Amino acid sequence: MYDIVVIGAGPAGMTAALYAARADREVLLLEKESFGGQVVFSPKIENYPGYMQMSGNEFADKLIEQVLAQGVTVELDEAVEIRDGKVKTVVCASGTEYECGAVIIATGSRHRMLGLEDEEKFVGNGISFCAVCDGAFYADQTVAVIGGGNSALQEAVLLSDICKKVTIVQNLDFLTGEGKLVSLLAKRENVDYIYGATVEKFLGSDELTGLILDQKGTKIRLDVDGVFVAIGQVPVNDAFAPVADIDTRGYILSGEDCLTKTPGVFVAGDCRTKNIRQITTACGDGATAAMTACRYLNDQ
Ligand SMILES: Cc1cc2nc3c(=O)[nH]c(=O)nc-3n(C[C@H](O)[C@H](O)[C@H](O)COP(=O)(O)OP(=O)(O)OC[C@H]3O[C@@H](n4cnc5c(N)ncnc54)[C@H](O)[C@@H]3O)c2cc1C
């Protein structure tokens, strides 16, 4: 039996595991995909205090190294249920069940899809969500980036170093990302923009060959080798609805105290209702949730 099970090894979950282990608790950290969470999709992090610049992968490596050095047990498995009781049980997709005194949910969010026909089929066959991971497959080719926020512009910057041409397709008439990224892209001659347009259809049979866009009623055909979708993130918390209230957008309802409706079940990071979703705020939540969970265990 563990003192605390942390679900999700992004910045929130890894910070929670670190704090709980340093408070002398037996901690299990569960991760369903890859250690680091969303940061692994970030080519450059320039707003984490103390570091002028680092890649998301570098940050993720440092976090997991630190967590393991503190004696946290780590398992690659997906938590699919939390059973409440004096002793709580975290049930995993593999069928393994872990008993513990407290649970911290730090499941973050995943890429939002466009929700179009054939989208799932083309993921990995022309549709990607990560220029760091897949950009090299499109060296000297033409790609489209869907979205106009920070993530989309970061993807476009990286792709414009590698690809022959990058077209940014934005549904609004302007970009919403940081001014610094907008001006950086404005200097790149291989980047162009289609504003006020939405993707209507993916073209191709096995491999994606292009897009049909709808620009205020006018149909545009855009032939591309690849599409990078960067239209934001969505949380995936339905499995935890019995122990935590969830808002209409899928986020777990909680405040800065990281509490849920169930005593002994806490929530940290991007998966909870909050205004700013960043690495620093996720780490802050991780520390709060861990310390509050330790206090809860002391009181039992
Ligand atoms: C492209 C991109 C660039 C970014 N750049 C920056 C930046 O420069 N600076 C900055 O501050 N922020 C940046 N962010 C935002 C930042 O990455 C997030 O705010 C931060 O990662 C949130 O941390 P988290 O731990 O709450 O969630 P996540 O990072 O989403 O981690 C959650 C983890 O939980 C795992 N998980 C989910 N469900 C389960 C389950 N049921 N069982 C087990 N594991 C599960 C997921 O696989 C994931 O690893 C960027 C985000 C993106 C997408």
Image (spheres, helix red, strand yellow):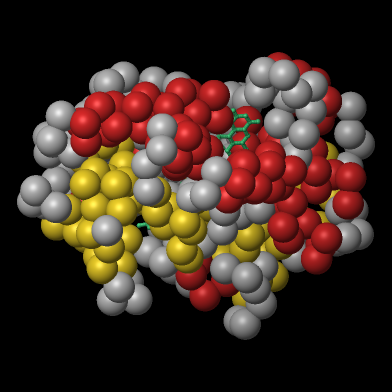
Q: Nearer the viewer, residue 76 or 227?
A: 76
Q: Which residue occupies the foreground of this view, 224 or 119?
A: 119
Residue at the image point whose x is 55% and y is 43% from the top = 70
Q: Is residue 132 left or right of residue 27?
A: right
Q: Is residue 126 above or below residue 15?
A: below
Seen at 48% across and 58% down, the residue is 74
| Quadrant of image for the C terminus | top left
Classify the position of the N terminus by image quarter: bottom left
Residue 107, compared with residue 73, is above or below; it is above
From this view, report whether residue 100 is shown above or below residue 209: above
Percent across and percent down for residue 201 are: 52, 62
Q: In this figure, what is the number of numbered marks?
A: 0
* Front in this rendered view, residue 262 or 42: 262
Residue 229, horizontal then vertical, whole percent: 59, 51
Res 176 visible: yes
Residue 216 in sight here: no
What is the quadrant of residue 265 in the picture?
Answer: top left
Where residue 21 sits: x, y (%)? 45, 40
Task: Write the residue at 31% across / 67% down.
Answer: 92
Q: Residue at x 91, y 59 (%)?
A: 140
Point out the residue furthest to the front here.
24
The spot of residue 88 in percent (x, y) is 17, 53
- 77 vs 133, left or right, is left
- Identify whether 46 is placed above or below 171: above
